[in-house]
Amino acid sequence: MANHFRSTERQGSGGDGMRLVPPSENIVSNVPDIEPVENADEPQTPAATENAPEAVHVVTASDPADSTSEQERPYTSVFASLAGNDAPVTPHTGTPTISFKSVTLIYPAQPNKPALEDVSLDIYPGEFVFVVGHSGSGKSSLLRLITCERRATSGQVLVAGQDLTKLKNKKVPYLRRQIGTVYQDFKLLPDKTVYENVAFALECIGKPRAVINVQVPEVLRLVGLAEKQDNYPDQLSGGEQQRVSVARAMVNRPPLLICDEPTGNLDPAISLGIMKLLDRINREGTTVVMATHDREMVDSMRKRVIALEAGHVVRDQEKGGYGYYGAL
Ligand SMILES: Nc1ncnc2c1ncn2[C@@H]1O[C@H](COP(=O)(O)OP(=O)(O)OP(=O)(O)O)[C@@H](O)[C@H]1O
């Protein structure tokens, strides 16, 4: 299969020597060559640059697209150090990693209220995309279509060039090997240690023990949990549990990462540690799509933002902000 997942060039400006590794090379050492996670409570640098939105390609929301500017904020966001204002926009060329063509999703339990209706969008290799919107606007449903947990009622969902509306059930596990997932509730196995939780992801796809023995310690070091590899999930903080789930999602070095409110249960300082990890994974070439309610994070990081309202895309903006959605 052609590699429609991975970008061919790095995004961002801070050169840290990371290398893109085609999946075929990722047999033994497939963890990105990046520094381990730093302490989340390290001193934060002030907001770097102006945050005027650029390259808006669709804005149809009646509300203003961008919310509070850096100047208006009474304090510097903990996420300010991840602002990508100076980073070039990922080119929207070639085959999209994810393509929705007039997609509608109707759950049988709610036949008169589509969770998604006539959604069309393209996400390209190497992009980092936030999906925002009210509770019930369709964010998780959109992600479930990408991971093939749900099938579209009509329209076409293409992931890595494959039409998921036609994908046979027996082929779904192969698709999922290409997609790392991180959820708000971590979804760790309680009776397995940190090491075993991460190793299990590789065992499930038939990786040999020799490979597991190399990759698991490597990824645990990357997320800063090497010392806790023998702990069980209930012996970890929420932030540590989420780092295990990020380690598990990336240990097979998937070219696409789907995150559904990965920082939803975490305080801002701990969320920052998780976001630093995901930002680095993205800068190394992995496409990241993240549903979130975290206004501060979205406003600070200035990534592409897709906003949903009642199952419709109402805004799609490069370097966007969270927008005005009132209480969520
Ligand atoms: N399994 C389901 N069966 C029936 N309806 C569902 C199901 N899952 C979601 N829905 C409905 O689909 C719509 C979109 O839900 P979805 O979970 O995608 O929203 P969301 O934006 O992710 O919300 P939240 O921010 O609260 O997680 C809602 O009206 C919801 O009630």
Image (tube, grey):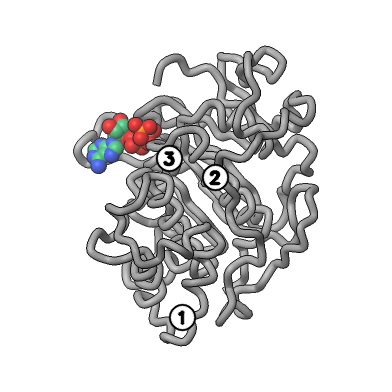
What is the CA distance from the residue labelled 2 to the residue labelled 1?
A: 25 Å
Q: Indicate the secondary structure of the residue bearing disc 2.
A: helix
Say which of 85 and 148 sits in front.
85
Distance from mark 2 CB to nearest ligand 1 atom below 8 Å: no
Identify residue type, mark 2: Gly
Instruction: Residue 145: tell me if it is visible.
Output: no
- Establish whether ligand 1 lies closer than 8 Å to the Cβ of label 3: yes
Q: In which quarter of the image is the N terminus?
A: bottom right
Q: Which mark is residue 213?
A: 1
Depth check: give the residue in front, 31 or 269. 269
Above or below: residue 27 compared with residue 239: below
In the picture, measured across the screen, residue 167 lies left or right of residue 111, that is: right
171 lies above or below 266:
below
Label 3–label 2 contact, CB within 8 A: no
Residue at (41, 35) in percent of width and height? 117
Tag 3 residue = 261
- Crowding at dot 1, Cα within 10 Å, few <14 / some 14-19 / many 20+, comes out as few
Out of 236 and 316, give the one closest to the viewer. 236
323 to the left or right of 43: left
Q: Which is closer to the viewer, label 3 or label 1?
A: 1
Quadrant in which residue 197 is drawn: bottom left
Q: Of the residues under marks 3 and 2, which one precedes in the sequence? A: 3
Query: In the image, what residue occupies the spot 61% across and 46% down?
Result: 128
Q: Classify mark 1: helix, strand or loop.
A: helix
Pointer 2 and pointer 1: residues touching (CB < 8 Å)? no
**Amino acid carrying mark 3 in the image:** Glu
Quadrant in the picture for the C terminus: top left
Q: In this view, does 174 lie above or below 48?
A: below
Residue depicted at 32% across the width and 67% down the height: 169
Residue under label 2: 273
Q: Which residue is painted at 45% across and 53% down in the image? A: 243
Q: Residue 177: image x %, image y %?
A: 44, 68
